[in-house]
Amino acid sequence: MSNSSETLLRVSGVYTAYDKADVLQDVNLEAQAGKITCLLGSNGSGKSTLIRSLLGLTPPNKGSILFDGIELSGLPTHKIVETGLSCIPEGRRVFPKLSVEDNLKVGAYQEKDNTVVASRLKEVYDTFPRLADRKGQLAGTMSGGEQAMVSIGRGLMGAPKLLLIDEPSLGLSPLFVKENFNIIRRINERGITIFLVEQNVHQTLAISDYGYVLSKGSVVASGTPSELSSTKEVHDAYFG
Amino acid sequence: MDIGFLAQYLMNGLMLGMMYALVAVGFTLFFGVLDVIKFSHGDVLTVGAFTALATYLGLEQIGVTDPATQILVMVIVSTVLIGGLGAVIARTVILPLRSAPPLNTLLITLMLGTVLREAVRLFYPEGGNPKPFPALLPTDSVTFGNFNLRLDNVLMFGAGVLVIVGTQWMLNRTKLGLAIRAVAQDEETAKTMGINFNLIVFITFALGSALAAFAGVMNGLYYNEINFGMGLLLGVIGFSAAIVGGMGNLYGAILGGFLFAALQTIGAVALPFASAYKDVFAFAVVIAIMAWRPTGLIQEKVSDRV
Ligand SMILES: Nc1ncnc2c1ncn2[C@@H]1O[C@H](COP(=O)(O)OP(=O)(O)O)[C@@H](O)[C@H]1O
Ligand SMILES: [Mg+2]
């Protein structure tokens, strides 16, 4: 990792559990400002749990999450979002009975200035013209690919410093998966730092600057994409 | 039957339907945001009616006797205080019980209702007896044959329409309404949008409770009498109306409220020899509707995703 860039997110010694099931054990990782950092790992390794910990949905029992100089652990979710985090959750989770436009607007919930909201809305519609055509449609009645656009657009409406993306390609057609990775790269080019959780190793490493591998709730490998693609842990984590 | 009598029944049905709808909207809001059924809702209405009555007596004491001022102050004091009570109930009873089985919430709100009811009975001066409620609205009327259209009824109905339309507008057109709808659909994702979940819950419970207080005042003005048990039946009817309409759906609750009143009215007209059975008739039809459409009349159809 180069020292020239600044660390935006630092997760140190995080332990997270659901009721009785311990999931994350001593997770340590960082995301550099302006970069795409990825987290790879097989199904059930705890990737979504880490996202949930960052967002305060399943707060860690132990450890520290330092974001942009602010300690996030212990804060309620809406306060965490206020510090500049936004997410595109696993399974997209659009609000099914809200229109496309209301879904997008709720993404900018904390923005008080309506003209700012309007300009962000325009930006999202420019990125996804299909959403502009269907702004009045209930999101729950859209196809998986369209819901993915709504979910991405909604994540952008918060104008986050750090965008957390959890398995965006899950359940999408290969063509749309490819498009999705292009979109993520373009979002990053606009200056938004990205923390990307994926199972899709090759395409993920192709757009990432740095990556971690999670296995059974612990980080077992980290490095640049070229380092990781030749690492035994990556193969073990997926095929082992 | 005489058309004038029918018109009278219709007017009465509309007034009752409005009160039921106001109560049902509260049930549906609470269920929407938290998936809970708050059985103390009817008794919150009672407390609202008694709060308004106490406010009236207080105003009389300090020499405020203009009826328009009185009624305005009564409605404001009652809805604001009861809204606060609703938020306090959400904070101290409903939210802490979220991790418990739903049956516990049901049981505890049922007990809370009893506590509120008994508190009115025991602590309101001579609270065990029915209390006269002042007729503050102008009672001018026009008579068409057997139909006596009273201005106070028209005013009350108009105010009810305004309140319901205002609630509807707030839910569908404002940012607060957007947050309430988002929380109702997906609590967790709503939180990750930056919505303060607890605050939205408090506001929703305050709103629903204020609507019940409004219905309580309306009930007092309509019958010119209130009693500590008035919320019991109103609560059960409002709950049935919300269920029949489709729990969680605002329009369903309104529809359910007026439907129930219509059934009662039909029962009273069709069974003139036994109008005491109008509630039996109405509830029997409700049971039949539920057997026919177990999830309510207005069903939500959004789950067919591609
Ligand atoms: N809500 C939950 N309650 C209990 N256990 C959970 C919950 N969510 C996930 N888990 C468990 O935590 C582990 C990690 O899950 P998750 O973080 O979803 O993994 P990933 O996103 O990497 O597939 C799994 O063993 C899963 O069964
Ligand atoms: Mg996952």
Image (cartoon, coloured by chain):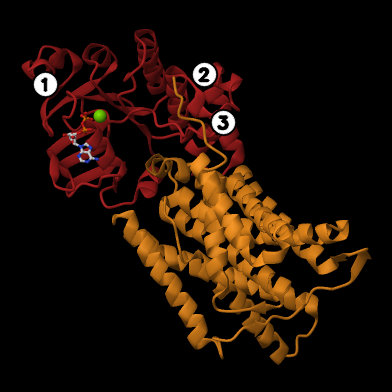
Chain colours: A red, B orange
Query: Which image quadrant: the N terminus of chain B?
Result: bottom right
Mark 3 and mark 2 lie on one chain; the one further toward the N terminus is: 3
Amino acid bearing label 2: Phe
Left or right of residue B136: residue A198: left
Q: Residue A147, position in %: x, y? A: 45, 23
Residue occupying the point 64% across, 61% down:
B278
Residue A4: quarter of image:
top left
Left or right of residue B299: residue A75: left
Tell which tag, 3 or 2, sits nearer the viewer. 3
Query: Which image quadrant: the C terminus of chain B?
Result: top left
Q: Secondary structure at mark 2?
A: loop
Amino acid bearing label 1: Ala
**Chain name for mark 3:** A
Residue that numbered label 3 is attached to: A101
Residue that numbered label 2 is attached to: A128
Mark 2 and mark 1 lie on one chain; the one further toward the N terminus is: 2
Q: CA distance from mark 2 to mark 1?
A: 35 Å
Image position of B188 with respect to B19: above or below: above
Q: Residue A134, position in %: x, y? A: 58, 22
Amino acid bearing label 3: Glu
Image position of B259 with respect to B92: above or below: above
The answer as to whether the residues below labels 3 and 2 share one chain is yes
Residue that numbered label 1 is attached to: A237
* Near-viewer residue (A42 or A84): A42
Image position of B28 with respect to B228: above or below: above
* Near-viewer residue (B248 or B141): B141
Residue occupying the point 51% across, 70% down:
B43
Label 1 crowd (10 A; few <14 / some 14-19 / many >=20): some
Q: Residue B195, position in %: x, y? A: 45, 47
Label 2 crowd (10 A; few <14 / some 14-19 / many >=20): some
Marks 3/1 in contact by CB < 8 Å: the verdict is: no
Mark 3 and mark 1 lie on one chain; the one further toward the N terminus is: 3
